[in-house]
Amino acid sequence: MKRVCFLLKVRAERLEEYRRRHDAVWPEMLDALRATGWHNYSLFLRGDGLLVGYLETPDFDAALAAMAETDVNARWQAEMAPFFEDLDGRRPDEGMFTLDEVFHLD
């Protein structure tokens, strides 16, 4: 499994609503993530809006591509886009800034 970490920035004025939305992620979205290879997926939100995502997947590009083909992802991304800064017209799943893993303690 490949470990993937990414960053996004949530708008300060939308932090609480963003948290509430993730308290009730659509079951259809959760099913799609699982079916397309997203495992051990977590999101961490800092008080200033820095969002750190972590997941494990055999192939991140394939997992992204498979999600991009689902209707539920298109709807979710459209609803979530206004929460983020600096997307420049991209969907949140297209604006993730991935980090290189430099150390892992197994």
Image (tube, rainbow, N blue to C red):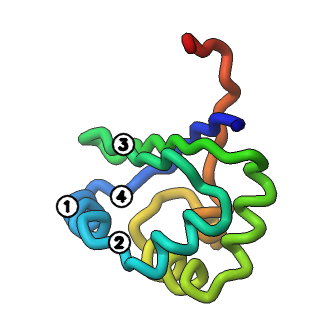
Residue for badge 4:
11
Residue at image position (67%, 15%) is 102
User: For mark 2, does the 10 Å Cα neighbourhood hold few (<14), some (14 to 19), or many (20 or more) residues?
Assistant: few
- Tag 4, which secondary structure? loop
State which quadrant residue 69 falls in: bottom right
Mark 4 to mark 1 CA distance (whole Å): 10 Å
Q: Earlier in the sequence, mark 4 or mark 1?
A: 4
Residue at image position (66%, 82%) is 70
Please state which of the two labelled residues, at mark 3 or mark 4, is closer to the viewer: 3
Q: Earlier in the sequence, mark 3 or mark 1?
A: 1
Residue at image position (57%, 73%) is 32
The type of residue carrying mark 2 is Val
Please state which of the two labelled residues, at mark 3 or mark 1, is closer to the viewer: 3
The type of residue carrying mark 4 is Arg
Q: Position of residue 68 (x, y in %)?
A: 70, 74
Q: How many marks?
A: 4
Q: Is residue 75 above or below residue 86?
A: below
- Tag 2, which secondary structure? loop
Please state which of the two labelled residues, at mark 1 or mark 2, is closer to the viewer: 2
Q: Earlier in the sequence, mark 3 or mark 4?
A: 4
Q: What quarter of the picture does the N terminus occupy? A: top right
Question: Which residue occupies the foreground of this view, 59 or 14?
Answer: 59
Q: Position of residue 72 (x, y in %)?
A: 55, 84
In the rendered structure, find residue 44 and report the number of the disc placed on it. 3
Residue for badge 2:
25
In the rendered structure, find residue 68 and report the number of the disc placed on it. none
